[in-house]
């Protein structure tokens, strides 16, 4: 089985779902969102499924579908649930799997179980998504340091949308030397054709 790719970001609203759709399309991979909190009628799994067009990808059901749009630990508690490490088992497939996290690395799934713990448990490699905003340098460098500290491999770094040149130059000086990065444009319109055409930037994965 291929090593799973875990798409995470330096924060919330970074564009993980779009990047997940692009990678899923390019690799004709399967997709799995372990925890969906809120937006159950417009879930990330549904969005990815609507954006990819290849005939080989499977969208696997979430382990948790929580009603509240909140941190997973809070959304689970609202339904009198506790998210435990043993609740997560990789789909049994013989192809590439793209896993999309919720929020960033330190998002709590429970009071003691964090998103980064799930990444390690699943023995995945990280695709780290960056978007330009005030504070993104700090959040990016903290994420890189944490991944290094936990010895979690980074497969690729993604600049999502337009980046400030000065910000980009600083970040590039701190990227691990053995990690490649790609740029994803800001989409004016999301469509299967745009996803299919843009997915090629991930050809090196």
Image: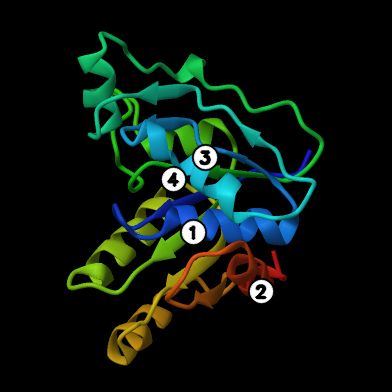
Judging from the image, what secondary structure is the residue with disc 3 in?
A: helix
Q: Position of residue 19 (x, y in %)?
A: 52, 60
The residue singled out by tag 4 in the image is 150
Residues at circles 2 and 1 in contact by the CB criterion of under 8 Å: no
The residue singled out by tag 1 in the image is 18
CA gap, disc 2 and disc 4: 35 Å
Q: Position of residue 204 (x, y in %)?
A: 71, 70
Query: Which of the two discs, 3 and 4, labels the residue nearer the N terminus?
Result: 3
CA gap, disc 1 and disc 3: 11 Å
69 displayed left or right of 198? left
Q: Nearer the viewer, residue 183 or 150?
A: 183
Quarter occupied by the C terminus:
bottom right
Q: Which mark is residue 45?
A: 3
Q: Position of residue 93 (x, y in %)?
A: 77, 32
CA gap, disc 3 and disc 4: 28 Å
Q: Is residue 100 visible?
A: no
42 displayed left or right of 71? right
Image position of 197 with respect to 96: above or below: below
Image position of 107 with respect to 18: above or below: above
Q: Residue 167's quadrant in the figure?
A: bottom left
């Amino acid at each position: 089985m291929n090593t799973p790719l875990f798409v995470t970001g330096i924060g919330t609203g970074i564009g993980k779902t779009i990047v997940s759709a692009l990678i899923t399309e390019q690799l004709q991979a399967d997709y799995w969102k372990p925890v969906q909190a809120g937006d159950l009628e417009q879930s990330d799994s549904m969005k990815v499924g609507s954006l990819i067009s290849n005939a080989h990808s499977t969208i696997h059901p979430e382990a948790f579908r929580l009603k509240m749009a909140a941190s997973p630990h809070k959304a689970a508690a609202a339904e009198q649930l506790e998210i435990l490490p043993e609740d997560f088992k990789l789909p049994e497939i013989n192809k590439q799997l793209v896993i999309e996290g919720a929020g960033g690395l330190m998002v709590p799934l429970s009071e003691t179980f964090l998103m980064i713990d799930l990444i390690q448990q699943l023995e995945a490699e990280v695709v780290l998504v960056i978007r330009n905003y005030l504070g993104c340098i700090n959040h990016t460098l903290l994420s890189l340091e944490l991944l290094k500290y936990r010895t979690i491999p980074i497969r690729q770094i993604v600049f999502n949308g337009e980046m400030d040149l000065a910000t980009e130059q600083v970040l590039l000086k701190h990227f691990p030397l053995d990690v490649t990065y790609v740029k994803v444009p800001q989409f004016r319109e999301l469509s299967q054709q745009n996803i299919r055409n843009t997915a090629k930037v991930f050809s090196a994965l």
